[in-house]
Amino acid sequence: MTDHPVARRTVIKSAGLSIGAGLASGITSAHAQTAAAAAQEIWSGEYWAHKGNVKLAMYRKRLTAPAANAPQQPVLFLVHGSSNAARSSYDLTVPGSGEYSMMNVFARYGYDVWTMDHDGYGKSDSSGNNSDIASGVEDLKAAMPVVTQETGQQRIHFYGTSSGGIRTAAYAQAQPEHVDRLVLCAFTYKGEGAAEIQRRQKNIEALRANPRRKRDANMIRSIFTRDGHPGIYESAVPEAIIAAEMKFGDTIPSGTYLDMAANLPVVDPTKVMCPVLMARGEWDGNSTNDDLLDFFRQLPNGDRQFVILPQTAHSAGFSKNRDLLWYVMKNFLAAPAPMAS
């Protein structure tokens, strides 16, 4: 399907969220955020992009409502992975726990933060395809005119986790003119030697046979146990995701799983021209250090970093050590441009 040249905006829903403001400056722990007495309102909005006849739901958060004469804020676009939609991936509320919304965290850092439900996920329409990596690139192409129209910016930062990182890297390869700095978390290049990729390879025929796969409560819980270190997550996290996701049904598109099982690599690192941060949890079963360093060494831009997050597995943004991810992201995205020799 082709993307619509100008995506249509919906009515913006403005909402003040009462949340701990412990990360307004610097990094503090999730526990400190929970204990913080101060509250900070974060403006939120919802939009639609059009990929042909398929409507794609988009979400936005920032500290203040957009205004015509206000200074531009740097834009950060968050791209979700294979098994959950955008809001449960990046704007999750975990009752009784600390901050789990990356959208809130980076809105407090001064970013204009966006995310979207890909084709067949969350509130977005389904084209009936399997929403593979190529489809995800078309989704991002359809979203970019909305971001440009609303922010006035042609080049923005991107963050993708798991297959969202593959989607984002493939988009950076396809439309480099729109990508400023790129963060790839829990990425997979070729998948060689990765335990989770080997498990998916056993299901290739089933993934090929159906554009959607089963994603029930037990499957969501398995995301947090499959790497062998369930203690690095709070038990309330998968339950909060289940509560957010089950309203969309118990199946999701199978395309990214199939791509990761049968079609890797789908990104050529020599064609990703922007600055790149690669962050990997030390126990991430979707990759190995060798796999990712192979990708990293081929990146043409000298402005690049490779970070291993200790005591962390595949779902770094949901771990007890998620503030380590936020820390390296914040410093990378805010890095000054290097001077030319």
Image (cartoon, rainbow, N blue to C red):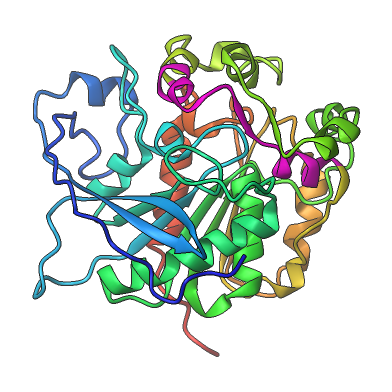
Q: Which residues are magenta?
A: 241-261
* Visible residue check, residue 291: yes
At horizontal 41% and vertical 34% (from top left) the residue drawn is 323
Q: Quadrant of the N terminus?
A: bottom right
At horizontal 71% and vertical 15% (from top left) the residue drawn is 228
Q: Is residue 36 left or right of residue 181?
A: left
Asked if residue 249 lies in the magenta stretch, the reply is yes
* Visible residue check, residue 305: no
Q: On screen, 88 above or below 110? A: above
Hey, which quadrant is residue 81 in on the image?
A: top right
Q: Position of residue 307 (x, y in %)?
A: 61, 47
Q: Main secondary structure of the magenta part?
A: helix
Asked if residue 208 lies in the magenta stretch, the reply is no
Hey, which quadrant is residue 311 in on the image?
A: top right
Hey, which quadrant is residue 274 in on the image?
A: bottom right
Q: Is residue 232 left or right of residue 114?
A: right
Q: Quadrant of the C terminus?
A: bottom right
Front residue of this view, candidates 275 and 201? 201
Q: On screen, 170 above or below 61? A: below
Q: Position of residue 256 (x, y in %)?
A: 71, 44
Q: Position of residue 67 (x, y in %)?
A: 10, 67
Q: Is residue 10 left or right of residue 257?
A: left
Front residue of this view, candidates 148 and 130? 130
Front residue of this view, candidates 198 and 291? 198
Q: On screen, 187 above or below 37? A: below
Q: On screen, 295 above or below 327? A: below
Q: Residue furthest bottom?
A: 341
